[in-house]
Amino acid sequence: MSSTNTVLTGRNGLYAAGAALAALAFNQVSSRRAEHRYPPVGRILDVDGVAVHVLERGSGDPVVLIHGSGSLIQDFMTSGLVDRLAESRRVIVFDRPGYGYSARPRGTVWTPERQAALLVAACAQIGVERPVVMGHSWGTLVALAWALDHPEKLSRLVLASGYFFPTMRPDAVPTTIAGMPIIGDLISHTIAPIQTRLTGPFGNRMVFSPARPPQRFLDYMPFGLILRPQQLRATAADSGQMPAAAARLAKRYGELKLPVTILWGEGDKLVDQSIQSARLLRELSQAVGLEIAGGGHMIHHVRPDLVTNAILAPGLPVPA
């Protein structure tokens, strides 16, 4: 009986190894195809030895847009935000480290503070001074770190659908594991891309709910780039560190002196905005805020007009 079990165990191990190798090969081929189909939309900067992908459009006073977890530059392009802002502003959009075509070198813990420092250095390299900085979702942590650590390097903050205070998150343990060295690499190169392909449509519906994903988003977002192992690993690492990062930054919110606009969507399924954006609005005396009816988490897609107006002017946009 024991010898039979040993044989079965050995066969199962071979099957598992074969499945892992097949998944690895499939994901590598899919990544190469995605990069061929979706080349960089901007240019690649060398910022202190780190490759940073940046898109620039328009002219005028600068605006920097910082995307959330699991996303990339094209999120702001497909929402129409880049085109709207570029009519009167110089718009700068970065892929955060590990996303799109920006590198995420090993040996560095890519906290919001470290990511902000990289983007501040990138802005200095391309001659951007004191921009309005808008962060969406996880990107709000980077925007806040920018304002707290480099207050002279921006003029105003716009925080959309943010996560600002630590909470218990059921996804913290699996995402932390998926973002770890070795085991995280194994997961991101084998299971994670296939699993995400299967759950992606549901995820899109949830992130937009109670609104629906716009057809422009579904047609033009480069999902193949998002599904590459390196980006999935960056997403997991960022998600795993989110509560600790928010706890660390929250202790310093009283240091903020610049104007802050806080926007969030009614019915956000990803973040309980009553204990995030609404709370931050109460705590910052200089802040103004607006809940967008039916906006969900992706308010820049659902109401790009209101988000654009909030970026352009320090007051609040008036919903139509």
Image (cartoon, rainbow, N blue to C red):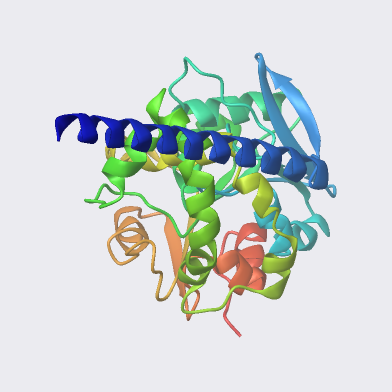
What residue appears at the point 60 percent right and 63 percent down from the top-left corner?
A: 310
> In this orientation, does residue 223 appear?
yes
Whether residue 209 sits left or right of residue 246 in the image: it is right
> In this orientation, does residue 150 appear?
no
Whether residue 248 sits left or right of residue 231 in the image: it is left
Q: Residue furthest bottom?
A: 320
- The relative height of residue 31 versus residue 197 in the rendered view (above or below) is above
How far across and down, in percent of the image, does residue 298 sit?
54, 65
How far across and down, in percent of the image, does residue 91 sit?
75, 48
In this orientation, which residue lies closer to the viewer: 204 or 60?
A: 204
**In the picture, residue 45 is in which quadrant?**
top right
Q: Considering the image in quadrants, where does the N terminus appear?
A: top left
**In the picture, residue 50 is in which quadrant?**
top right
**In the picture, residue 3 is in which quadrant?**
top left
How far across and down, in percent of the image, does residue 134 sit?
58, 50
Q: Residue furthest left?
A: 1
How far across and down, in percent of the image, does residue 219 sit?
74, 66
Q: How many marks?
A: 0
What residue appears at the point 35 percent right and 49 percent down from the top-left corner?
A: 164
- The relative height of residue 75 versus residue 174 in the rendered view (above or below) is below
Q: Considering the image in quadrants, where does the C terminus appear?
A: bottom right
In this orientation, which residue lies closer to the viewer: 150 or 159?
A: 159
What residue appears at the point 73 percent right and 45 percent down from the top-left corner?
A: 34
Whether residue 229 sits left or right of residue 237 in the image: it is right
What residue appears at the point 54 percent right and 25 percent down from the top-left corner?
A: 117
